[in-house]
Every structure is written in structure tokens, then in C-alpha cells.
Image (tube, grey):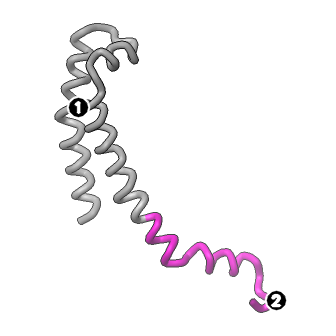
């Protein structure tokens, strides 16, 4: 590096690299939505009903049933749709 190069130009060249752009794209477009899909599937299908009831302060049985339906069926479909639309 030239000792007369301002520090701002050095940091701009480092933070505009293709590697950082690629990692930002992969993290924001692939990894975060994929983690959300996996969490929704795990919570809705693999965590037992008793554990979910004990783990939350539910105002009523109807609220819990509605939440469970959403987390099991609606949320994964919505997240998969968002995931596919973001990639393409």
C-alpha cells in the first residue's frame, strides 16, 4: 500500500469486495429464511403440545389452537414462498 493513500480509500476498497457482497446475499437471502422455516417446522411438528402449553402464558385454549395451526401450516408455506421469491 502507498503510505500516502487516505485511510478512507483503503476501507472503501476492503468493504466493497465481492466476498462481502456474496456473504451478505447468502446470509440475508438464504440462511435467515431457511433458519426461520426450520424453526417453524421444528416448533410446529416436533415440540410436544404439553411443552408448548407449559412454555407460554396462553390467554385461552382457542388462542393456543390458533397459534398452533398458524405455526404448523400457514407459517411454513408463507416462509417458503418468501424464500423462493427472494432467490428468483
Which quadrant would the C terminus be assigned to in this image? Answer: bottom left
Q: Residue 14 lies in magenta, yes or no?
A: yes
| Residue at x 47%, y 71% (from the top left corner) | 21
- Tag 2's secondary structure? loop
| Residue at x 29%, y 36% (from the top left corner) | 42
| Residue at x 25%, y 23% (from the top left corner) | 67
| Residue at x 37%, y 13% (from the top left corner) | 54
Q: Are marks 1 and 2 in contact (CB under 8 Å)?
A: no
- Tag 1's secondary structure? helix
Q: Which mark is residue 61?
A: none
Foreground of the two, 4 or 1? 1
Q: Main secondary structure of the magenta part?
A: helix
Residue 9 is situated, as x and y percent measured from the top left of the image, at 69, 80
Residue 7 lies, with reference to residue 47, above or below; the image says: below
Residue 5 is situated, as x and y percent measured from the top left of the image, at 77, 86
Give the Cα distance between marks 1 and 2: 60 Å
Q: Quadrant of residue 85?
A: bottom left
Residue denoted by label 2: 4
Which quadrant would the N terminus be assigned to in this image? Answer: bottom right
Q: Which residues are magenta?
A: 1-24
Q: Quadrant of residue 36?
A: top left
Tell which tag, 1 or 2, sits nearer the viewer. Answer: 1
Amino acid at each position: 500500500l502507498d503510505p500516502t493513500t487516505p485511510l478512507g480509500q483503503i476501507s472503501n476498497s476492503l468493504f466493497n469486495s465481492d466476498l462481502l457482497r456474496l456473504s451478505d446475499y447468502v446470509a440475508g437471502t438464504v440462511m435467515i429464511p431457511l433458519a426461520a422455516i426450520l424453526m417453524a417446522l421444528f416448533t410446529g411438528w416436533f415440540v410436544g403440545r404439553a411443552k408448548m402449553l407449559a412454555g407460554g402464558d396462553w390467554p385461552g385454549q382457542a388462542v393456543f389452537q390458533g397459534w398452533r395451526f398458524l405455526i404448523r401450516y400457514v407459517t411454513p408455506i408463507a416462509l417458503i414462498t418468501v424464500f423462493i421469491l427472494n432467490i428468483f
